[in-house]
Image (cartoon, rainbow, N blue to C red):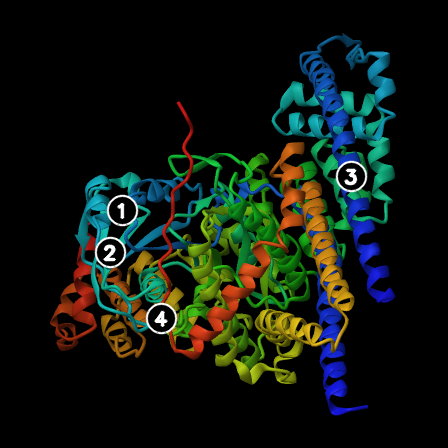
Amino acid sequence: MIFFEVLLSFFFALAICLITFLSFYLFVRKIWRREYVKWDMMIDLLLRKAIFFHEDKAGQLALIPVTPRLKANLKNKRFCRQFVKKIIAAKRNMSGRYGENLRHLYIQLGLDKKALRLLESRKWHVRAYAIQQIGTMGLKEHLTRIYRYTNNKNDLVRIEAQIAVLNLFGFEGLRFLDIISYQITEWQQIRLLKELATVPLAELTGIDKWLNSGNPSVVIFALKLVRNYHRYELYEHIVSCLDHGDASVRKQAISTLTEIYTESTSEELLSRFEAETYKNQIAIMNAIAVIGDVQNVSTLLGYLEAEQHEMKFAVARALVNGNATGLECLLNDPRSKTYPLNDMIPQLKSEIKW
Amino acid sequence: MSWQSFLIDFFTYGLLTYSLLLLSCYIFIAAFSIGEIRNYLRKNSFTDYGVLAGSRQAPSISILAPAYNEGANIIENVRSLLSINYTNLEVIIINDGSKDDSLSKLIEVYDLYKADFFVNGQIETKEVRGVYRSRKVVYRKLIVVDKQNGGKADALNVGINVSSNDYIVCIDVDCILEQDAILKLAKPFLENTKKRVIATGGVIRIANSCIVENGRLLKVKLPRQFLPRVQTLEYIRAFLLGRMAWSRLNGLLLISGAFGAFDKEIVVKCGGYNHKTVGEDMELVVRMRRYMQEKGIAHKVSFIPDPLCWTEAPSTFKILGRQRNRWTRGTIETLQMHKVMFFNPKYGLLGMISYPYWFFFEFLAPLVEFFGFIAFIVFASFGLIQWSFFLGLLLFIFSFGFLYSVFAILTEVLTYNQYKTNRNLLLLILTAFLEPLIFHPFVVWSAIKGNIDLLRKKNSWGEMTRKGFTKEKV
């Protein structure tokens, strides 16, 4: 009985402690929220002033006037965090002189030094936060300190460092692909491509080297670069990727070829069809349906023997779209009168109409 | 020692040990989930989901929404689904042989025509009567399938057959999705390197009393009625603490049928949803995991703590009873179908921890609780144990239940804080106090009825009438 009584009292006491903490937390948060509203206005005012500031002294930017109160507030961690959050958000949306002014204000307030101190933190999210600040604020002088994080073991630190390097140096920043040993996830690739879309288009070199990388995710990313930036001169390299040992690399190569194809691409793809995995075979048929230029229709007709309806449908679609006589050949084939081809053909015909 | 006293001691201490084990599991789950939620929130603060919305590289997703007699709200619900901001998306509404005017309403409002469409019968289903597409380009993402009635699992299987994308998101058509729900659900599939992510689930929240307009959630409110409110608390506990901990362990066996995303390739390889069980959502996840384990492919079922989907909870004991009865039958059926996994080291963590946990603490818990309670009353009535011992044990369990709920409320406030006002929090705490007295005994009783119904081979889904959401007053 004593055992129950002790535990029972303990549980109730703990529940009351939690409720007390909850009440205290809500009370404190209410006060903080009021502060945030007040600070928000103060920060907005300064940022507006900074954005439109233009007082040059002998070619150098003069100091942006900052109130002593705001300077004092910057010693407060919460205020500083809120300020950095707002200035980063503003900088992301500004370019040219306005963005430069914000950068100038950031440095003037010594926030760059704080960010550098945070870089040494043991906590991964603090380091990622510091890297994000340095990248967004365009502090190129700290490249060497960020660059080593592009191959960090923590995925968030790694991606923030990679994004920061791209922010600072555009396409040139992609040289981290030379050394990266970790896999670049699809999410990271999407972020990197999105970031690249915002930097000025410059000469993009090194893709051929990345296409031969030992890291399959680097090869896939390079293939995506080729596709997005239509690098036709790398066509032969892409075709050689069709023989890569990694199936996902080959699949990406097939996808890339739908953007930079020649008259012989469909035949190149068809020649590899039988040796491919099922998923890649479907990808090949889908690619042929886009590219067209199929010379040998009989090969495709042969693949209609596939057991899976998904494959049959993909082959039929490739046949219809791959050659001007494809539909006719399909309709003349005796199998087209029987299930499932007889069900597939009306849809394929309607797709042509569209 | 007589055999009677031995039996009573064995029973008493057995039950006590069971209770302590169960409570230890809960403590472990609560503690373990905290780290996972914290990590997620930290990572999430760096995530811009907008990157995915317009990206050509984003995974292609098909939303599958089965509808049966949903005529009253189908137009609004479909509009809500079509407004989701995601490029690689198709919305498939499966009319599961509705007896009302659902289909004709859809045809009229969305200007649909019967399209020539080849349905790949990779999963066997009831007959598909027709596939409809819209003439209007603005609705090009919409596909409506009309089929013979076959139940939710069969309707979802038809959706899988019709879908042309790599991932499927299965939802209840009357659920309200957050605008970024699909983006958040898609992201885990893009982050896998060593382990293939085969399914992702998100937190489901209770929408009773919330303000909903045109299929969009305008204002979150704590349910006014006791039953939906207590389910709000229950869902916070289950999703925020329970599933996050299991996700961290990579031992999650359930993605809610109301909202979950799956890798279509694996779903098809596993044969799709099983229409022989009323717990098709759990059964599919277990089967997929079992398949991956048997093939020796490293995999993960991921879970997101963000509130992504809002649904209407039963507000009467009658409907709630049916729902819990069904859940119980679904759990038992799934456990029966996959009994080979029970303490089977071949299935790793799933076989050694997840399955046994579900067996001992999800399936057996209501039975142990019910029969233990009756036995204690009998023993105490015959003077075989002291009433004070019995009451002490009850109060001990009650105090733990209350503590656990308060902890869940605290976690909710520190993370998402959906029910912002002090009044709401006070109401939730009061609900936590009342839950073990009113709600919990009813849930246990419904589970017992579920067991009985299963023994009687009752296989019905149980009608789930809904009242509809609250609309904004003009």
Q: Is residue A335 above or below residue B415?
A: below
Evaluate if marks 3 and 2 touch, with contact meaning CB atoms under 8 Å apart.
no
Q: CA distance from mark 4 to mark 3?
A: 50 Å
Q: Which residue is mark 1?
A: B71
Q: Is residue B184 above or below residue A211?
A: above
Residue depicted at 61% across the width and 80% down the height? B347
Where disc 4 sits, the SS reads: helix
In the shown orientation, is residue A300 left or right of residue B342?
Answer: left
Callout 2: few (<14), some (14-19), or many (20+) C-alpha neighbours within 10 Å? some
Q: In which chain is the residue bearing label 3?
A: A
Which quarter of the figure has residue B244?
bottom right
Q: Position of residue A17 (x, y in %)?
A: 82, 45
Q: In which chain is the residue bearing label 1?
A: B
Callout 1: few (<14), some (14-19), or many (20+) C-alpha neighbours within 10 Å? some
Q: Which residue is mark 3?
A: A130
Report the disc number at residue A181: none
Which residue appears farthest toward the front when viewing the image?
B382
Report the disc number at residue B98: 2
Viewer-proximal residue among A249 and B130: B130
Residue A161 in sight in this render: yes
Q: Amino acid at mark 2?
A: Ser
Q: Amino acid at mark 1?
A: Gly
Q: Position of residue A180 (x, y in %)?
A: 70, 57
